[in-house]
Image (spheres, coloured by chain):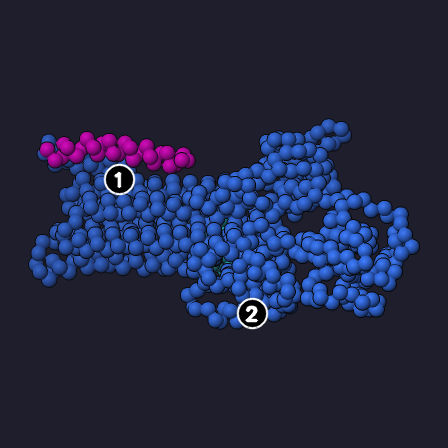
Chain colours: A blue, B cyan
């Protein structure tokens, strides 16, 4: 609680004490006349002078209808009618309600600030032989920094020395720490736990992961959701409407029926007290706020409340294949020699591909595993779109696709058509082929199963890859509808078709990561990008970013959004419902000022407490060690 | 030019939208977004008139919402 909040609390407590003393005195008729007025006027002014002052000031500026005005009229009216205790009570409880609201908002804001408090303040770097603390901005690529146990890793880099475990929870929501060895990547923002790490920096601070995340959060558009827009418009018309109704209630019935004015003015005042829309106006953003905060805790950044709202209505989920459901890294799945043995075939391929940077070449070399004697590789020719031709130990080795074999006139195994395969030939003789596949992410199947459990049966996979590979991956993860061999523009068309086909209430969610996914991400109702592997363009275009690259997080964030919307609806119905009932009772004379106050403040407090529930995501955090897609396998030097 | 202004003492969500609407109507302001949750207001203006517009915003906000404090880069606007 900050200073002004503490001061207000003090005033409230003093007022309550005086009030508690004054009440019995009043009801036992021990006081009378001006003494009676005084014992209530003092606490009233103590707790409410601010409100009265603000009401007057705002009227002077031309702004009449606000909470301050309502409360002032209601309480002054009560005093005029001789209902001193009621006047004090209304003001006292109103202030209590306001303080509570203010506290809840500050707390929620601090919560989100904490979640985002991943900014590192310094880096340890050797300068002139001494380990000095510098601003992370000053560190260059390839500089060597040291991260001591307990410190936050200030920049993205590769571990050169040291064994440790790293707490990635602030960025990924993973409670279990990640072990790191030399050769592994570490990202900024995580906390180094056990061992001393020496890291070679790969990205400057402004381009580091932590900077990107902070930028995402601070600059997100934050478009207002439908519920929020509704509430804002509602509040604008509601207040004047109720004031007029109150005036009518105070004036018309007495005029028409000849009854005493004071009865009806009393009821009108009760009306006014109840009319304050604060509970609604506060609880709706607070609930969404809780939902977004909750999503951050599990490593998913939702850029705006409107997206959270739409996620709750997801009807169809469309997944891109490469990089989203698969790791985007190639693996050798089988070595099929012809006229030689597996080891020789692999060796030939590895030597031929040695100088290539292509991911396929990388996977072949990795599988080969042995150190390559570059001295025996003499001539290397890379043929884009075909493969590679190299002279190894005097032998001409060809490694490439079917087109390369056809071009060189070498008969090859045609059963492999439609698959991703590297054919190898030595001195014009076919030596066999190596099967390459993109590894499916560990949680991909779970991702699809979870979505079905949440009620989303319509799941589609899109890929630019060939039909055989595409269908195989789809079958593996449990997706029935697959579209393969797609060009980027085809993906847009298919998503547009799917958008037409769905019902108006349901939403289409697209999950992707590549540069070419940006237009699709923009076209879908909700675009979800992979935060770690994904391209900057995709992250920029997306509405939701999964920092851990785990597709299984989609189902979880949908659950969070559904829970948040439920809470929002509960609050709206509850707040409006109670108010309308008490208003009706008040108009009929069946509710007094006390009831009105409790209904107003009580409703606010309950609505806020309910809204805080959205922050509770314990159900979605798995305590076991999940495979973080941010981990990259050690590179072979 | 986009300026992010920290908005203090913004305690109710309807005040946030009131602020947003008021600033939106001002001359020179091409876009404004008030984020109640992070207490930040982003104002977009044409480069040439930026300083003037900020001054005007400060005056106007002081008039209609005197409790609110605006800060840019740590200085009170």
**Residue A345 horizontal side relative to residue A479, left or right:** right
A22, A512: nearer the viewer: A512
Instruction: Kindly identify the residue that appears in the image at 52 percent across and 54 percent down.
Output: A447
Query: What is the CA distance from the residue labelled 2 to the residue labelled 1?
Result: 60 Å
Q: Are marks 2 and 1 on the same chain?
A: yes
Q: Position of residue A274 (x, y in %)?
A: 24, 51
Q: Is residue A608 magenta?
A: no
| Chain containing the residue with disc 1 | A
Q: What residue is at 54 percent from the left and 67 percent from the top?
A: A495
Position of residue A591 measured from the top left corner of the image (x, y, whole percent) = 16, 49
Q: Residue B28: image x %, image y %?
A: 53, 60
Pinpoint the chain carrying mark 2.
Answer: A
Magenta range: A1-28
Residue furthest out toward the top: A130
**In the depicted structure, whether residue A5 falls above or below residue A69:** above
Name the residue nearer the viewer: A294 or A387: A387
Tell me the residue at 26%/41% (across/down).
A93
* Residue at the spot 20% in from the left edge and 36% down from the top edge: A40
**Residue linked to disc 1:** A92
Label 2 belongs to which residue? Answer: A494
* Furthest residue toward right: A394
Mark 2 surroundings: few (<14), some (14-19) or many (≥20) residues within 10 A:
some
The quadrant in which the N terminus of chain A is found is top left
Does the image show residue A354? no
Q: Earlier in the sequence, mark 2 or mark 1?
A: 1
Q: Main secondary structure of the magenta part?
A: helix
At numbered mark 1, what does the secondary structure look like: helix, strand or loop? helix
Between A106 and A67, the one lying in front of the other is A106
Q: Secondary structure at mark 2?
A: helix
Query: Which quarter of the image is occupied by the C terminus of chain A?
Result: top right
Quadrant hosting residue A385: bottom right
């Amino acid at each position: 609680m900050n200073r002004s909040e503490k001061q207000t609390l003090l005033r409230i407590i003093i007022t309550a004490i005086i009030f508690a003393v004054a009440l019995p005195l009043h009801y036992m008729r021990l006081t009378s006349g001006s003494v009676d007025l005084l014992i209530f006027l003092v606490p009233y002014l103590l707790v409410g002078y601010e409100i009265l002052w603000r009401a007057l000031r705002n009227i002077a500026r031309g702004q009449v209808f606000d909470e301050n005005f309502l409360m002032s009229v209601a309480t002054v009216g009560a005093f005029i009618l001789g209902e001193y205790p009621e006047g004090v009570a209304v003001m006292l409880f109103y202030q209590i309600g306001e303080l509570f609201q203010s506290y809840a908002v500050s707390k929620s804001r601090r919560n989100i600030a904490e979640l985002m408090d991943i900014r590192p303040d310094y880096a340890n770097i050797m300068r002139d032989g001494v380990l000095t603390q510098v601003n992370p901005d000053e560190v260059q690529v390839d500089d060597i920094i040291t991260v001591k146990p307990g410190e936050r890793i200030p920049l993205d880099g590769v571990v050169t020395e040291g064994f440790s475990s790293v707490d990635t929870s602030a960025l990924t929501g993973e409670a279990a720490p990640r072990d790191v060895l030399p050769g592994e990547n570490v990202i900024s923002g995580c906390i180094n736990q056990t061992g001393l790490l020496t890291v070679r920096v790969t990205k400057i601070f402004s381009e580091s992961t932590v900077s990107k995340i902070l930028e995402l959060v601070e600059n997100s558009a934050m478009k207002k959701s439908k519920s929020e827009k509704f509430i804002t418009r509602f509040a604008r018309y509601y207040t004047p409407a109720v004031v007029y109704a109150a005036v009518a209630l105070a004036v018309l019935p007495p005029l028409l029926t000849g009854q005493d004015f004071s009865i009806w003015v009393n009821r009108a005042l009760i009306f006014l007290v109840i009319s304050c829309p604060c509970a609604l106006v506060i609880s709706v953003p607070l609930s969404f706020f809780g939902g977004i905060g909750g999503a951050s805790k599990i490593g998913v950044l939702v850029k705006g409340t409107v997206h959270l709202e739409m996620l709750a209505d997801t009807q169809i989920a469309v997944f891109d294949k490469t990089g989203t459901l698969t790791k985007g890294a190639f693996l050798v799945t089988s070595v099929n020699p012809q006229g030689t043995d597996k080891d020789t075939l692999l060796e030939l391929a590895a030597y031929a591909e040695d100088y290539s940077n292509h991911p396929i070449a990388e996977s072949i070399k990795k599988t080969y595993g042995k150190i390559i004697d570059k001295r025996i590789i003499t001539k290397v020719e890379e043929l884009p779109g075909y493969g590679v031709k190299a002279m190894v130990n005097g032998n001409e080795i060809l490694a490439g696709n079917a087109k390369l074999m056809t071009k060189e006139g070498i008969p090859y195994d045609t059963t492999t058509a439609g698959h991703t395969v590297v054919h190898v030939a030595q001195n014009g003789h076919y030596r066999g082929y190596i099967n390459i596949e993109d590894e499916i992410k560990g949680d991909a199947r779970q991702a699809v199963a979870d979505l079905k459990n949440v009620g989303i049966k319509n799941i589609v996979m899109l890929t630019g890859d060939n039909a055989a590979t595409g269908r195989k991956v789809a079958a593996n993860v449990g997706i029935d509808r697959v579209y393969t061999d797609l060009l980027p523009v085809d993906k847009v068309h298919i998503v547009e078709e799917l958008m037409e086909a769905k019902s108006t209430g349901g939403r289409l969610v697209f999950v992707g990561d590549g540069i070419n996914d940006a237009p699709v991400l923009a076209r879908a109702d909700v675009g979800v990008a992979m935060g770690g592997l994904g391209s900057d363009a995709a992250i920029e275009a997306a509405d939701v970013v999964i920092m851990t690259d785990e597709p299984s997080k989609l189902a979880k964030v949908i659950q969070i959004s559904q829970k948040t919307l439920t809470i929002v609806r509960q609050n709206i119905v509850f707040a409006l419902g109670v108010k309308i009932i008490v208003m009706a009772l008040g108009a009929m004379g069946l509710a007094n000022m006390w009831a009105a106050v409790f209904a107003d403040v009580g409703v606010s407090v309950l609505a806020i407490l309910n809204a805080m529930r959205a922050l509770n995501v314990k159900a979605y955090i798995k305590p076991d060690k999940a495979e973080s897609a941010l981990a990259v396998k050690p590179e072979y030097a | 030019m986009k300026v992010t202004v920290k908005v203090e003492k913004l305690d109710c969500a309807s005040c946030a939208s009131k602020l947003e609407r008021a600033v939106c109507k001002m001359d020179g302001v091409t876009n404004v977004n008030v984020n109640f949750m992070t207490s930040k207001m982003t104002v977009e203006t044409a480069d040439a008139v930026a300083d003037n517009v900020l001054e005007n915003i400060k005056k106007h906000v002081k008039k209609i919402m005197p409790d609110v404090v605006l800060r840019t880069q740590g200085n009170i606007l």
